[in-house]
Amino acid sequence: MIVVACGQKGPPLPPLVLTPAPPVVIADRHGSTIEIGFTVPIANADGSRPANIVRIDIYAINDVATSITDLEMMKRGTRVASVPVKSPRNPNDTVEAGESADVLEPPEGKGLDQGAASSVAEQITASMLKPNDGERRSPHGAPPQAVPLLGPSEAASIRTYIGVGIDRRGRPGRFSKRVTVPLALAPPRPSQPSITYTETKITVQWSPPSTAEADTDADLLPSKPFGSWRADMAYNVYDSETGARLTSAPIKALEYQDSRIEWGATRCYAVRAVEVIGGSALESDAGEPGCETLVDTFPPAAPKGLTAVSTGGAIHLIWEANAETDLAGYYVLRAQLPDTHLVRVTKDPIQEATFLDNVQPGVRFAYAVVAVDKEGNSSAPSKRVEEMAR
């Protein structure tokens, strides 16, 4: 006898909801501009890939951010930016963490790639300095909605940012860590830098900000005595062409040395003053940039160790090779004694640190060697030596 067991059907399981992992958010203050950088997540909160995401939203709020939840911050704060992100055609078509994603169709649509880094900027305005902004931007372009202030009416001291990925149904994913920037008056700008260089390094120098610069933006933000800045002023140096920061940390010195020597290249630098407030670096606007085109005007070192060896019908010269990487070669100079005026024997630079001069036996000659680089810069002559062929 065959017995067939029948299973009892339970209630249908709810559809799987894939929540985007949190983006990584950073924020830096430069003068009256706040730059918010973020990295798009590539996975969901459970580790599956690709992320079920269509955009990244960035929100900001003043002062009260530590006393409210992430969702409250999203509702009450200002939506600073909404950046589209490429999303999967089927959000449920994923692979687990550690598995290859080659079997999946790549995310599609307009916007940033998953895993890409980008940034947005927010300008500090007088209306922003209210403790809780007073309004936030509608997600669909409707007029701003009034939001009651949550704190006193005096100017805010910090601004807090948070980022979140939004899925296809408009639901928020995991929120990023919060980052804050001070809203105090930025330090004044330093002077335009001056630039000098040698064969091995570029030296960038500048002067501290003037008293006149200390009044910049004073009508927007609370003022600060100029002398209190001067006591603890530090500086960051930037490549003003690429925007890359060259100093790993703010420096107290009024000088920076750059080893990026490349003849023919133009190097441009801008300097920002830095003040640290509550652990956050507050930078000034960039001072006027200074630029310099690097031209090789530096001659090689004079060759050393010149020695003359007499042979039959010739004089053999040898010397120590120069170490310059841009060396083009050597010129050999000769004078027939008693005349001491040296003239060039080799028309073009020779590559080796040796030369055989076929001369009349029994006649005494003086020699020196000059090094020349690829730009045509010539060294001083080596020491003179005298010899006659046998």
Image (tube, rainbow, N blue to C red):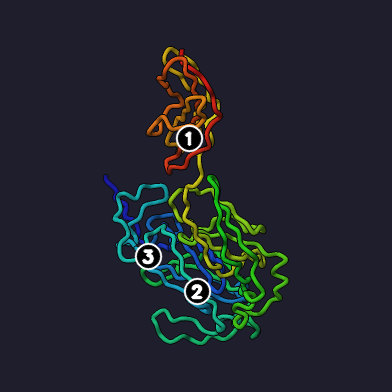
Residue 311, located in which quarter of the rendered image? top left
Tell me the SS state at disc 3.
Answer: loop
Residue 208 place in picture, x, y as percent:
65, 66
Residue position for label 2: 122
User: How many marks can you see?
Assistant: 3
Tag of residue 371: 1
Q: Is residue 348 visible?
A: yes
Discs 1, 3 touching: Cβ within 8 Å: no
Residue 195 place in picture, x, y as percent:
55, 57
Residue 209 place in picture, x, y as percent:
64, 69
In the picture shown, does residue 162 fall above or below 302?
below
Marks 1 and 2, how far apart at CA:
57 Å
Tag of residue 311: none
Residue 247 place in picture, x, y as percent:
58, 55
Residue 177, located in which quarter of the rendered image? bottom right
**Amino acid carrying mark 3 in the image:** Val
Structural crowding at the residue carrying mark 1, measured as other residues with C-alpha within 10 Å and reported as few (<14), some (14–19) or many (≥20): many
148 or 364, nearer to the observer: 364
Q: Residue furthest front?
A: 338
Tell me the SS state at disc 1.
Answer: strand
Marks 3 and 2, how far apart at CA:
20 Å
Structural crowding at the residue carrying mark 3, measured as other residues with C-alpha within 10 Å and reported as few (<14), some (14–19) or many (≥20): many
**Amino acid carrying mark 2 in the image:** Glu
